[in-house]
Image (cartoon, grey):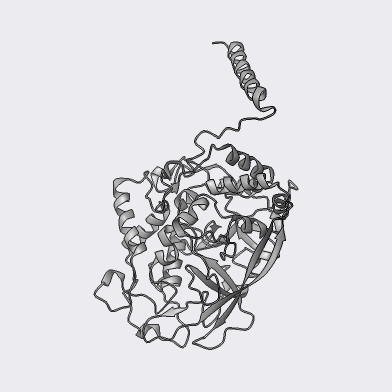
Amino acid sequence: MNIKGKNGIIFLLGLLVLTACNSNENDYVVLVAEDGEQYGGGVSTVVNASEEAFGFASQALTAREQVDFGVGNSFFRQSWVSAPASTTARDGLGPFFNAVTCSSCHFKDGRGRPPAFDGEFGEGLLLRLSLPGTQDNGAAHVDPVYGNQLQDASILGVDKKGTYRITYETSTETLADGTTVTLQKPIYTIENLGYGSLVPGVLVSPRIAGQMVGLGMLEAVPEATILAFADEFDTDADGISGRPNYVYDEESQSQKMGRFGWKANQPSIKQQVGAAFLGDMGITSYLFPNENCPPNVDCDNIPNGGSPEITNDNFDRVVLYSQSLSVPIRRDFDDQNVLNGKAIFNDMACTSCHIPKMETGNDYYIAGFRNQTIRPYTDLLLHDMGDGLADNAPDFQASGSEWRTPPLWGIGLINTVNKHTNLLHDGRARNVTEAILWHGGEAEVAKEKFKQLSTQDREDVLAFINSL
């Protein structure tokens, strides 16, 4: 077939499609999904949308990696206990901690949520503590007694560092169709301090446990790809100016680009896992070998689970587990309302930060994750989200109002897996609508466009987001 003939057939087919659509539906245009759009995690996509959807290993793992994934899974899910104990592989909890197992906060590898009201039990919310100024490695100063995290539990015989309470103040947003939405802003009170007062002016930043799916795929995206999304000085004048965070990498003892955590304050999944073991459960590792103890507590005389408390091999297996959880397949991705919502999502410029599609590199250490097309809906960059979401706590180069764009894949299954729909860094938003209405700063224009949508278009946007 020559080129002229091929184009002629395409033109004829296009004319037939348009005629078919226009003859019965006036100006109705059939929207079409992209090829492979439903496979957000590339080869690490699992065809499962059940309450177990976040817990599957990537099929790209080798047989040996699958064995390590299984061991890592067991260390992720099973409880740690205080030392000494007969369970020598899992002793060493504390002396201070927030949870006894990783899955306490990342239940079924999903998201945590804050207490719904004062006195209610939340799952997976902790408070970071910092002081103005930076250390030599670029990190913020920490409270000299309580460290960088309020650990609200302790082992038997050791006083707790403290506890916190949460209350909410409410405000109302009115949408163009008259719908009113009540937003709730959390107010935290730290009390029952066991080792004296906090330093005056200590900065408190709440952080909720995030979903675990697809993390390795994000780690496999080349740094150059992420930098290509950045526009720190908004040279294209579109009002969006994402920039990378640069943070301290413990393993190389150098500065590296951050891409994990709510403020992109972790350079790698390994460091994220090590920091969580130490901060959340008081478990030392080869990456973080020292306990986080107040100055007047002699942790050397408190029984521990060894040095380090998790063996190097088991630590690396939990890291592999955290890297290789599959992304659940999209649902209703070719539904006309979902596709309309997708088009509006793009028109509102939400995709300026929630980048739909990118490629992984060709040198990631898990060979099966290389050269994959993924659809995470994030740029992994910092954006100013305005005063409403600000915690006023700088984190390396992130300001007090900057947050990393969170990936959206899996967002529509949080309720199925975790039985809630709380979103944002502190879980204050109780659904997607509230999360959008909390957007300010660089996202203010997009939020206002959302508020002006018709009822049907707004529902379509929500249907699209919940299909991810």
Residue at horizontal 62%, vertical 13%? Answer: 8
Q: Is residue 177 above or below residue 17?
A: below
From this viewpoint, is residue 468 visible? Answer: no
Picture quarter with the N terminus = top right
Q: Position of residue 261 (x, y in %)?
A: 53, 61
215 left or right of 431? Answer: left
Q: Give coordinates of residue 419: x percent, y percent.
A: 47, 60
Spot the residue most to the left: 86
Q: Nearer the viewer, residue 332 or 288?
A: 332
**Residue placed at 54% from the left, 82% from the top?**
144
Residue 114 location (% of width, % of height): 53, 68
Relative to 133, say whether 443 is above or below: above
Instruction: Give the quarter of the image for residue 367.
Output: top left
In the depicted structure, whether residue 279 falls above or below residue 161: above
Res. 243 image quadrant: bottom right
Q: Is residue 108 visible?
A: yes
Percent across and percent down for residue 253 are: 49, 64
Along the line of sight, the residue nearer the viewer: 316 or 348: 348
Q: Is residue 23 above or below residue 51?
A: above
